[in-house]
Amino acid sequence: MVIVMTPSATESDIDAVVAHVNTHEGQAFVSRGVTRTIIGVVGSEAVLESIDASGLPGVADTKRITAPYKLVSADNHTKRTTIRVGGVPIGPDTFTLIAGPCAVETPEQTLESAQLAKRAGATLLRGGAYKPRSSPYAFQGLALDGLRILAEVREVTGLPVVTEVLDVKDIDDVAEYADMLQIGTRNMQNFGLLQAVGSIGKPVMIKRGLSATYEEWLMAAEYVAQRGNLDIVLCERGIRSYEPSIRNMFDVSAVPMMQRMSHLPIIVDPSHAAGRRDLVVPLARAGIAAGADGVMVDVHPHPEVALVDGAQALTGESLDELAKVVATLPALLGRTSAAHRAG
Amino acid sequence: MVIVMTPSATESDIDAVVAHVNTHEGQAFVSRGVTRTIIGVVGSEAVLESIDASGLPGVADTKRITAPYKLVSADNHTKRTTIRVGGVPIGPDTFTLIAGPCAVETPEQTLESAQLAKRAGATLLRGGAYKPRSSPYAFQGLALDGLRILAEVREVTGLPVVTEVLDVKDIDDVAEYADMLQIGTRNMQNFGLLQAVGSIGKPVMIKRGLSATYEEWLMAAEYVAQRGNLDIVLCERGIRSYEPSIRNMFDVSAVPMMQRMSHLPIIVDPSHAAGRRDLVVPLARAGIAAGADGVMVDVHPHPEVALVDGAQALTGESLDELAKVVATLPALLGRTSAAHRAG
Amino acid sequence: MVIVMTPSATESDIDAVVAHVNTHEGQAFVSRGVTRTIIGVVGSEAVLESIDASGLPGVADTKRITAPYKLVSADNHTKRTTIRVGGVPIGPDTFTLIAGPCAVETPEQTLESAQLAKRAGATLLRGGAYKPRSSPYAFQGLALDGLRILAEVREVTGLPVVTEVLDVKDIDDVAEYADMLQIGTRNMQNFGLLQAVGSIGKPVMIKRGLSATYEEWLMAAEYVAQRGNLDIVLCERGIRSYEPSIRNMFDVSAVPMMQRMSHLPIIVDPSHAAGRRDLVVPLARAGIAAGADGVMVDVHPHPEVALVDGAQALTGESLDELAKVVATLPALLGRTSAAHRAG
Amino acid sequence: MVIVMTPSATESDIDAVVAHVNTHEGQAFVSRGVTRTIIGVVGSEAVLESIDASGLPGVADTKRITAPYKLVSADNHTKRTTIRVGGVPIGPDTFTLIAGPCAVETPEQTLESAQLAKRAGATLLRGGAYKPRSSPYAFQGLALDGLRILAEVREVTGLPVVTEVLDVKDIDDVAEYADMLQIGTRNMQNFGLLQAVGSIGKPVMIKRGLSATYEEWLMAAEYVAQRGNLDIVLCERGIRSYEPSIRNMFDVSAVPMMQRMSHLPIIVDPSHAAGRRDLVVPLARAGIAAGADGVMVDVHPHPEVALVDGAQALTGESLDELAKVVATLPALLGRTSAAHRAG
């Protein structure tokens, strides 16, 4: 069961609802989004039937949700959610380009990448300070130094920062510097990490697991939401397939499906799907046309010397092409560009 | 090795090249497309090295192709090929909508479907007279009666006809009535059928096998080409995946990949990928944005009583939405609409 | 609905049942196996309810089957079926080794392979005269000459022959020479071919399609059965997967699953699953231990010069190892070796 | 590069080798197994060429390893490794049954499960105190209380304990109570967790990720080994597939492949692969026959009331059947039963 509060509901209204739920032996999970608060209620069938919150102050609506994901389900939402990352919206009315280097290597490379990103239309900066690598011998990222570089580049460019957190022990550091925390593909079912990022009150991006079903992906989001944080963005980045000539198979159906199953924004990462530069722009176009609320891409001033995933980083001509797509295609589909706005 | 003839090469020029190849103990496969003829040469390394056709009359170019698909490879083509189906082009400069009922059921249903298709912008009519069905007890199509209905509807609407052939024994019938023969997903490696349709001189559409790699798909096209027919269209229709909420996973990467690997046109079939009406238009948009040369969709005047795949057939509002997409998106990407032209 | 006849039912008993079904507007499909005849009945719910064959002479049992595969379903069988190939049984009580060259190349190579096979315990000879090849330029098999070689080797060794048929046009030739016809992976949903082999009264082996579900595989068998032939053997040979170091992924779960879903015998082909010699014996052991009714493997006297799939052919030591497995493991699981017996 | 030390090498021998590597600007990773120590060396091509440890005291062998997994590669091992869990061996000469409840629920249920396990031939007890669940609302395990129950049951039954650790914060607790720590499927690429368990000096079992390639799986093991711990067991538990009637597809090829690629022991978990009781014994047989060094299964005294995965837990007749398999099949393949021995 989900209890949706009105935008004007007060903290004491919320407390009263939670108390009501507890009295009837249900468990209440309060999730706060930008525009409203939702209270998920879990309990036995008998418990749920005994709860009637519809008359309490501040309650807008009460709904039984049959999907196993309650708080992130589309069922209780007439309109999909817009979240804000350092003031930049991601949601159904806008289009947001997130761009930057796969890994933060040096202050210069990061700044140069961010400037390329901005010129292409990006309003958020991506960049990895902690890198999940298949090999323990590979470059694992600059860690705290990388976070500091990202923060400096944000100062210069004005672009809020999206960066991955790999480990619970790093969450406080990452949260101090980042505007949105990214949960990577390999950690989509690292439930401790999901719960931890759900508790810190910053927007979270959840990349789809390598072979995750749509439902498993939404259950990962539910883990974050259940800890009180509804500011979640889903990110499709390709699934494992048998085809040897591409790194992952970009599942563009995930875009309309997530929009039917959930109220959360959904963006696409064609760089990590394709693994090769020449496919990034066609796949970005496909994702936008399918209805994605944003695109995240790797850019690098000198891909040939990039420490991680240089083969997929946009630069020069391919980046200009992306800029043109971003400037025209979302508008054709009725979206405005997602620049920074006073929240 | 591939020997590309000039557009003005004569039959005796071609014969001379074949004779030259045979003299050197190579095998020559002559493939005729709309605009030019290509001669594939197969033989041992020593044989290939001994052949020098570059000075022969009518020879434009000679190329060694390392891909196992020789005649359909992009290697020997500066521009991707445009083929014509009853005068309607499918190729890199145009956008072609193919629409119609999944199965031909009655003259009325077929005519009505064709009129809906035409109104939505279709310039080719699809419709199944022979239906491959998982169950031997399911409706298998009207066969010859279905072909006759398609031909009558073509008379009325002016739309050339695309229809599937399942069996070598039906090829002459299908070729008599159809403007393009379709090889279905289940028959992508039915090599006898591929060779037979390669010999009849009509355009062929090859749907991707359920789990076919890009290379296997192009090898299927090579089977057709090797029999002398280069008028081939590839059609992406989704691959098998583990995700239970969609019928197949629409592999939009296939569009740019086929355009890099082959000179053949590539279209997409979002209806059979999704298996559900509400995804067809988003996936069609994605396919077009990725660069597809055309889209094929199921339409039906009364999907609720359709004998086959009613759940995915467009009608009413969803068809209007597709019409709007077809009218605007390809133009944004620099394509003109593919109406009938004097061949 | 399925009507199971008693072993002693006469042709006129069968005719009477069919007439009864027709009178009630149902369709009857008579399938004859080695030990008994089954009549599948298809029709609307009302039709099926109106039919009552339980009192007719020769009727052993009448059952409603909910699975879409009626004739091959396990539902109406207390014991799984044993079929006979040139007198050699394949079924739940025995273990059958089928071995031979992937492709018939010469009389000598085929004879030598058959002798190796026999020495390892094989009681059936496999060998391809028609080879389905991804490339139109690859060796396609010796065709009719290959069939004749197989027949000669059968004369010498006494081993009945299993060989693939690729095309309806070759069925009569193949049926003349072979004791069991094989439907290959790529043709599992070539419905015309399935119906044609269902009509010729010889045992049929159906290899699983590259990404076929269990149900689709059984529906392919149902196509054969519906044409009157219940002498069908299923063969698991690996499915497509993302793992690059093996050719296909051997799905050993298919063995117990087929035995729960169907009454047909199920064997495994570890050679085509693995694509590499060193895995063939471990996978053969796995298949036998899982309960397979037989194993089919490639053997070749000189794999290094084999025209097709030499890398997976057993010879020398690896074949000795298989022989040892075949001599011990099935017996541990309660099976006897399947030598030729008077049918 | 890998430097293999002799069994009699001293700590100062090891220190000298590390110092030698450091002098040449390489990085040395010391991994200690039961029988010998291996030192992995990482560095640029020039660095590796400059290092020559072959003459140093205690060095048995020096090898260049081309696989990205150095310490766990089969390349530098003439014999596969045996590890010991509370004195119980897992390795090439023995066969080890690990059994117990999926989740620890109560002391009684755990004890009863352990007694069933022991009677069936188990020498190690499995049981989950921390359960990774797709839903945040599902039972998450008894945590520390569960660990205590496992320890008590070990006291009573003498069975050493294998249990999963989900989170770095719980490692000390789990390591205090468990004899082997299990890394679950969802955490196979949780690199922080892998590094942490690699540092605590207890055996580690690594379950294969849901769609992990063989190489990715071994790289996960390399993360543990790189932190100094070579006592690693791999566990195949089924991969994601498109087949709807089974939960995961049991990849039996993983057994011989891991034995060719790595020196680590490999066991199989047919319970989590199948997800249904009736397949567990056939798949266990298949795994053993393929050469697995052990089997891990779920058992439960009352599966119908189990809190987690009751549908796959063995009990009664199915458990007796497993006991019979364990008593006969490994012996046929030359293995002895892995009871507790003085280490």
Image: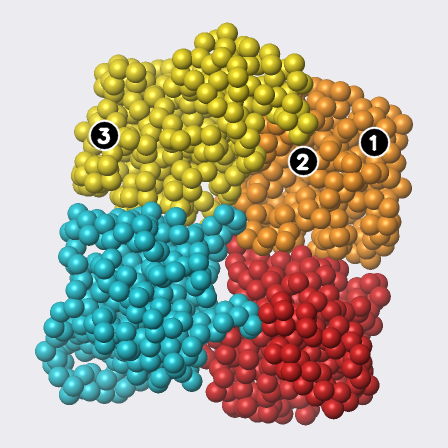
Chain colours: A yellow, B cyan, C red, D orange
Circle 2: element type: strand
Residue B257: give x, y in percent of width and height: 31, 55
Query: Circle 2 marks a residue in which chain?
Result: D
**Side of B273 where A168 appears, left or right:** right
Q: Residue at x 55, y 30 (%)?
A: A64
The secondary structure type at the circle numbered 3 is strand
Q: Which mark is residue A337?
A: 3
Q: Label 2, on which residue?
A: D205
Q: Position of residue D79 (x, y in %)?
A: 69, 47
Q: Are marks 1 and 3 on the same chain?
A: no
Q: Nearer the viewer, residue C274 or C193?
A: C193
The alpha-carbon separation of the residues under discs 2 and 1 comes to 24 Å
Quadrant in which the N terminus of chain A is drawn: top right
The amino acid type, in three-letter code, at marker 1 is Gln
Depth check, front residue: C262 or B256: C262
Do badges 3 and 2 share one subunit? Answer: no
Please state which of residues A212 and D127 is positioned toward the viewer in this rendering. A212
Residue under circle 1? D109
Q: Is residue A203 left or right of residue C72?
A: left
Disc 2: CA contacts within 10 A as few (<14), some (14-19) or many (>=20): many
Q: Quadrant of the C terminus of chain A?
A: top left
Numbered disc in front, either 1 or 3: 3
The chain identifier of the residue carrying mark 3 reads A
Pinpoint the chain carrying mark 1.
D
Q: Nearer the viewer, mark 3 or mark 2?
A: 3
Q: Are marks 3 and 2 in contact (CB under 8 Å)?
A: no
Closer mark to the observer between disc 2 and disc 1: 1
Rendered location of residue C144, percent (x, y)? 51, 90
Q: Quadrant of residue D158?
A: top right
